[in-house]
Image (cartoon, grey):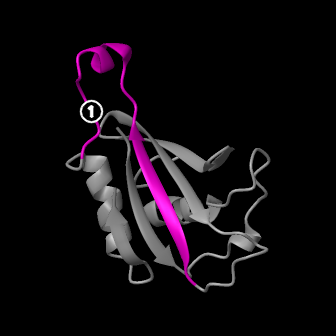
Amino acid sequence: MNLAIHFKTAKFDVTQEQINPINPIYGESLLIWLKSKLNGQLDICDPAAEDWGWYSTLTFEDNHYLIGASVFYSPEEDSAPELEWVLQIDKRQSLKQRLFGQNKMSLTDPCFIFFHELIRNCDEFKEVEIS
């Protein structure tokens, strides 16, 4: 199970992002901001493109995670000052853990709580919800 944090913000200028060569979906700027905000506190890799947006990987308390970011934006249609963003957090499990239902992602996962609090406590982010 992966969890997602949804929010709205005008903080990022997606038109300044690199072009996603796989699919024209934006989201890189959120991951760049997270990496700078963490400032070495966590070892998070540089963003990379994926067909559903952008992702980074990190290790948090000896567990491995994929952090995905995407935003609902169309250059032809969007003129809204605040865009709707999704930050998805997926916990990697070994085959054994998957088979035995161990080390699952949950709302109480320390990595999820960390990023949810980070997003929720940023004054520039509005309508923060989880799913």
Q: Which residue is nearer to you in this view: 60 or 65?
A: 65
Instruction: Tell me the quarter of the image containing the C terminus.
Output: bottom left
Q: Position of residue 121 (x, y in %)?
A: 32, 75
Q: Where is residue 21 in the image (x, y as percent from the top left)?
A: 80, 47
Q: Where is residue 73 in the image (x, y as percent from the top left)?
A: 66, 69
Residue on which disc 1 sits: 104
Q: Where is residue 89 in the image (x, y as percent from the top left)?
A: 41, 47
Q: Left or right of 126: which side holds 11?
A: right
Instruction: Tell me the quarter of the image containing the N terminus.
Output: top left
Q: Residue at x 40, y 54 (%)?
A: 4
In this picture, is 111 found above or below 8? Answer: above
Q: Which residue is drawn at 73% across and 65% down?
A: 17
Q: Residues within 10 Å of mark 1 (few under 14, many from 20)?
A: some
Instruction: Inspect the magenta stretch and tell me whether residue 83 lies in it.
Output: yes
Residues drawn in magenta: 82-106
In this picture, is 51 found above or below 128? Answer: above
Residue 77 seen in render: yes
Q: Left or right of 47: which side holds 9?
A: left
Instruction: Inspect the magenta stretch and tell me whether residue 72 lies in it.
Output: no
Amino acid beneath label 1: Lys
